[in-house]
């Protein structure tokens, strides 16, 4: 029988797993972006680890919760409260494929944003994602956010169903600009869930 997951704040020792999980959540887009940031001889996952090791920034181990089973990282949630007001200054300087995501984030100012929710394949189907969304709600309430938000690809129906079951509803869409060779096409969909009783 599979042991129950233990949920805990991520530590700097978890950054390798976090880099892989953020790439799973982003369906390969993070890896594509990291390729452009890599120094000569540096692998894309090394770039991802460096970013996860940061003490600040959205994708930082300090914003992550991990699910651990038998001493192994099974899944992760990375999230934080979006700025309110949300500043779109400099949008044109961002990579073209990132701009639709930023424009969608700007439509949920002050919400607690689920940036990453991913489970390694061998641990799926055990309710870990649903539990991590409960943790997201707790963190959103602690942050006094009025809502929770997440962005999901229109092609990712299992993820959309998970969020819908947790009370998230589609609020806005932007055409996804995806890297060459990407397997899917469609829109990025902003899904939002109100936190009634929150400030």
Image (cartoon, helix red, strand yellow):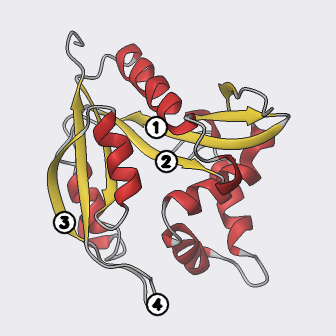
Mark sitting earlier along the chain (2/1): 1
Tell me the CA gap for discs 2 and 4.
23 Å
Circle 1: element type = strand
**Contact, mark 4 vs mark 1 (Cβ under 8 Å):** no
- Looking at the image, the residue that sits furthest to the front is 1
**Res. 14 image quadrant:** top right
> Which dot marks residue 138?
none
* Badge number at residue 116: 2
Question: Which is more toward the observer, 183 or 199?
Answer: 183
Q: Return the residue at label 1.
A: 79
Percent position (x, y) of residue 10?
A: 68, 33
Residue 74 pos. (x, y %): 70, 43
Q: As displayed, is residue 176 above or below residue 90? A: below
Considering every residue shown, the one lying at the far top of the view is 197
Position of residue 100 in the picture relative to residue 136 (left or right) = left
**How many numbered marks appear?**
4
Tell which circle, 1 or 3, labels the residue nearer the N-terminal end: 1
Residue ID at (66%, 53%) = 120
Residue displayed at 34% across by 56% down: 152
| Residue at x 26%, y 74% (from the top left corner) | 186
Q: Which residue is mark 3?
A: 174
Q: CA distance from mark 2 to mark 1?
A: 7 Å
Q: In the figure, 184 relative to 112: above or below?
A: below
Q: Which residue is mark 4?
A: 181
């Amino acid at each position: 029988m599979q042991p129950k997951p233990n949920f805990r704040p991520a530590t700097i020792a978890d950054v390798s797993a976090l880099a892989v999980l953020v790439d799973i959540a982003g369906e390969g887009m993070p890896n594509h972006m990291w390729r452009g940031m890599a120094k000569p001889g540096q692998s894309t996952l090394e770039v991802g680890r460096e970013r996860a090791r940061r003490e600040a920034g959205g994708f930082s181990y300090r914003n992550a919760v991990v699910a651990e089973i038998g001493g192994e990282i099974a899944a992760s949630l990375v999230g934080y409260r979006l700025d309110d007001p949300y500043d779109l200054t400099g949008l044109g300087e961002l990579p073209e494929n990132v701009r639709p995501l930023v424009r969608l984030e700007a439509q949920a100012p002050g919400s607690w944003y689920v940036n990453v929710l991913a489970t390694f394949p061998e641990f799926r189907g055990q309710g870990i994602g649903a539990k991590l969304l409960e943790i997201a709600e707790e963190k959103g309430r602690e942050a006094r956010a009025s809502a929770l938000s997440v962005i999901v690809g229109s092609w990712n129906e299992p993820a959309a169903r998970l969020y819908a079951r947790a009370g998230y509803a589609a609020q806005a869409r932007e055409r996804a600009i995806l890297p060459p060779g990407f397997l899917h096409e469609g829109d990025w969909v902003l899904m939002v869930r109100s936190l009634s009783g929150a400030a």
